[in-house]
């Protein structure tokens, strides 16, 4: 009796062939493709797949992004500081690239942590998107002079309406404030100027960059972080940057002291009372909203003062009338 045997079915081997950008060698991706991307595009690429995420989060790549975006960060001091952030220079870029905008649901609880003994400012000014001035400024915050004086950070350089319009269109500014102790950073500039004016006497052009922060008295109190760039004409007729200053002022136009300013800046660095938005949002629009709220506040204050003045006049009139009646009755 012949026994029949059944042959096993043939084995099918499936080969997965990668296609598209994932098929490229990692060295090609890292050297020739990812290095050509800017920060926001690189951050988006890291979300594509596991391979791109690994390559797009290399610290050296983000150091190059940061130093090319903000030349002032190329100093050894700031390179070391960026590397100490939670995710290195990638965290620094994520904190510093967007602009700040006031938040409507902020918490007003006080922060028990001790304030830093100093702040670091990385300032970069661009003309037609090309850097023309880069400066790192360190400010001590532990001295009594700082805490009891109006908050102001200055950087001075040595040495018609159409001009104002061109400057407003072509000049952009980055002012990154860093807390080296807490390893936090935030960009206080609006990137583009929110207003430009020419001084009637000196002829200097002043460009204002601003971010609107939540104050220390709840969401109804706002603070303007104003950065003023002063430009003056040189002997050759060209405009030169002569001064850059940063100050905080409340809705009544009063400049805040160092102690008050430090509290508000630390809240902004920690993401309290503010939210971070893209550069094309919250700049001039947020500043115009702030000016409108400031105007309405001033009108309410004038109406209240007028009401109080009228009440005082009425009270004085009643008192004078009563005194006259009493005196007349006394004489009788």
Image (tube, rainbow, N blue to C red):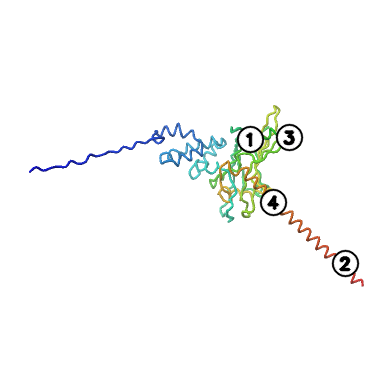
3D distance between C-alphas at marks 2 and 3 = 60 Å
Task: Measuring from the top left, give residue 16's x and y in whole percent.
Answer: 33, 37
Callouts 3 and 1 close, C-beta under 8 Å: no
Task: Measuring from the top left, give residue 119's x and y in whole percent.
Answer: 59, 44
3D distance between C-alphas at marks 1 and 4 = 29 Å
Toward the bottom, the furthest residue is 332
Callouts 4 and 3 close, C-beta under 8 Å: no
Task: Measuring from the top left, give residue 25's x and y in whole percent.
Answer: 39, 33
Report the residue marked by disc 3.
203
| Closer to us: 247 or 1 | 1
For the residue labelled by badge 4, is the local secondary structure a helix, a strand or a loop? helix
Q: Earlier in the sequence, mark 3 or mark 1?
A: 1
Q: Nearer the viewer, mark 2 or mark 4?
A: 4
- What is the tally of numbered marks visible in this picture? 4
3D distance between C-alphas at marks 3 and 1 = 19 Å
Quadrant including the C terminus: bottom right
Report the residue marked by disc 2.
324
Callouts 2 and 4 close, C-beta under 8 Å: no
3D distance between C-alphas at marks 4 and 3 = 31 Å
The numbered mark at residue 296 is 4
Report the residue marked by disc 1.
169
Q: Earlier in the sequence, mark 2 or mark 4?
A: 4
Q: Nearer the viewer, mark 2 or mark 3?
A: 2
Q: Earlier in the sequence, mark 2 or mark 3?
A: 3
Q: Nearer the viewer, mark 2 or mark 1?
A: 1
Position of 55 compared to 325: left or right? left
3D distance between C-alphas at marks 2 and 1 = 68 Å
Callouts 1 and 4 close, C-beta under 8 Å: no
Q: Earlier in the sequence, mark 2 or mark 1?
A: 1
């Amino acid at each position: 009796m012949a026994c029949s045997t059944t042959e096993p079915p043939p084995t099918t081997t499936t080969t997965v062939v990668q296609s598209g950008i994932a098929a490229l060698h990692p060295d090609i991706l890292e050297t020739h493709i990812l290095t050509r991307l800017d920060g926001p595009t690189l951050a988006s690429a890291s979300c594509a797949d596991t391979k791109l995420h690994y390559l797009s989060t290399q610290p050296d790549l983000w150091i190059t992004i940061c130093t090319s975006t903000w030349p002032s960060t190329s100093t050894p001091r700031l390179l070391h500081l960026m590397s100490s952030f939670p995710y290195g220079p990638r965290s620094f870029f994520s904190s510093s690239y967007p602009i700040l905008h006031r938040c409507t649901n902020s918490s007003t609880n006080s922060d028990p942590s001790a304030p830093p003994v100093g702040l670091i400012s990385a300032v970069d000014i661009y003309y037609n998107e090309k850097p023309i001035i880069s400066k790192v400024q360190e400010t001590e915050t532990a001295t009594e002079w700082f805490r009891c004086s109006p908050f102001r950070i200055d950087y001075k350089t040595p040495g018609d309406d159409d001009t104002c319009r061109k400057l407003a269109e072509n000049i952009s500014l980055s002012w990154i404030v860093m807390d080296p102790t807490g390893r936090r950073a935030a960009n206080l500039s609006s990137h583009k100027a929110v207003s430009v004016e020419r001084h009637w006497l000196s002829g200097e052009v002043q460009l204002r960059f601003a971010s609107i922060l939540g104050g220390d008295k709840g969401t109804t109190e706002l603070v303007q972080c104003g950065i003023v760039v002063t430009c003056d004409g040189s002997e050759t007729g060209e405009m030169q940057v002569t001064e850059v200053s940063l100050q905080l002022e409340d809705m009544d136009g009063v400049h805040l002291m160092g102690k008050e300013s430090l509290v508000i800046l630390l809240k902004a660095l920690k993401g309290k009372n503010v939210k971070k938005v893209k550069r094309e949002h919250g700049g001039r629009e947020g500043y115009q909203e702030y000016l409108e709220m400031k105007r309405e506040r001033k009108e309410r204050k004038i109406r209240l003062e007028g009401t109080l003045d009228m009440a005082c006049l009425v009270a004085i009139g009643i008192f004078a009338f009563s005194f006259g009646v009493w005196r007349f009755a006394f004489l009788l």
